[in-house]
Every structure is written in structure tokens, then in C-alpha cells.
Image: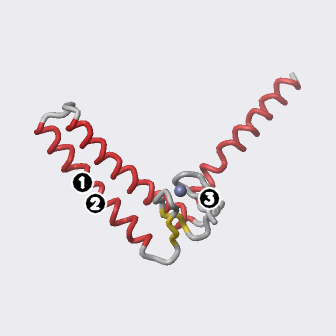
Amino acid sequence: MNLLIGGMALALAVTAWVIHPMIFRRWGLLGDGSTADAVDREARRRVALAALKDVEYDRAAGKLDEQDYREIRGRLEAEALRAVRAADADSGSARRKSHTCGFANPSDSRFCAGCGQPLT
Ligand SMILES: [Zn+2]
């Protein structure tokens, strides 16, 4: 019985240890919340631009007809424009530094959030 309780306590402790960064990051206790938001906006910008590129590839490959292409492209363009403007508002400040991969990282970053390489 004690082994079962001990095992459950250990499993609970391990689970809490694994998920705590996800919870505390959102609360801003592990780092600067504005930095996390800036990284999120930069990631959204990259995803939106990649989605636009994908829809162009799909059209070139003949996977989309003209009507679907125009509908999807219009929606993705509006989304990409919002994402680029939000990310540009961040990169306009001096707190950003661009890595060679093109990802704009917060100035206090030690590693690139885009590719994982150490920043010099
Ligand atoms: Zn990088």
C-alpha cells in the first residue's frame, strides 16, 4: 500500500515538474512575458508566410482550382499582413536582433528561437 501511494506521489511530482514551464511561462514567472509574446508574434509571421508559399506550391502543382486558390490566398494574405505588422512593431524596437536564419530574437536571447543555434 505504501508503495502504491509512493508511486502515485512520484508520478504526480514528475507530471508537475514536466508541465510547470508551460503554466509558468504563460503567467510570466519564468521570463519576461513581453519577450514570450514577441517570440509568438515572430513565429506567427513565419507560419503565415510559409502558408502563403504552400498555397502557391499547391496551385502550381494543380492541387487547387482557381476559385479555391483565390479564396484561400485572400484569407491567408489578410492573416499574413496582420502577422507581419504585429511582428514588425516588435522588430522596430531596439530590443530585437536578427539571426542569420532570419528569425528576429529578443535582445536578451542566448539561443535563436527559430533554429536553436547559439547567438553570439
Ligand atoms: Zn536562427
* Residue that carries the numbered disc 3 in the rendered image: 111
Quarter holding the N terminus is top right
Residue appearing at x 26%, y 49% in the figure = 76
Q: What SS does tag 3 mark? A: loop
Q: Position of residue 83 (x, y in %)?
A: 35, 59
Check mark 2 vs ligand 1: CB closer than 8 Å? yes or no. no
* Left/right of residue 63 with respect to residue 111 in the rendered view: left
Q: 89 or 24, which lies in front?
A: 89
Few, some or many C-alpha atoms within 10 Å of disc 3 (few <14, some 14-19, many ≥20)? some
Answer yes or no: disc 1 within 8 Å of ligand 1.
Answer: no
Other residues around mark 2 within 10 Å, as few (<14) / some (14–19) / many (≥20) = some
User: How far is the residue under mark 3 from the one under mark 2?
Assistant: 27 Å
- In the displayed structure image, the side of residue 35 where residue 46 appears, left or right: left
Residue at left 62%, top 58%?
111
Residue occupied by mark 1: 77
CA distance separating discs 1 and 3:
30 Å
Q: Quadrant of the C terminus?
A: bottom right
Which residue is painted at 30% across and 42% down in the image? 54
68 sits left or right of 108 in the view: left
The residue carrying pointer 1 sits among few (fewer than 14), some (14 to 19) or many (20 or more) residues within 10 Å by Cα, namely: some
Q: Which residue position is annotated with label 2?
A: 81
Amino acid at the residue labelled 2 = Leu
* Kind of residue indicated by mark 1: Glu
Instruction: Pick out the residue farthest to the bottom.
Output: 94
The correct choice, above or below, for 112 with respect to 97 in the image is above
Q: Residue at x 54, y 67 (%)?
A: 106
* Amino acid type, mark 3: Phe
Task: Find numbered disc 1 in the image and state the secondary structure of the residue it sits on.
Answer: helix
> Is 32 situated left or right of 102 in this image?
right
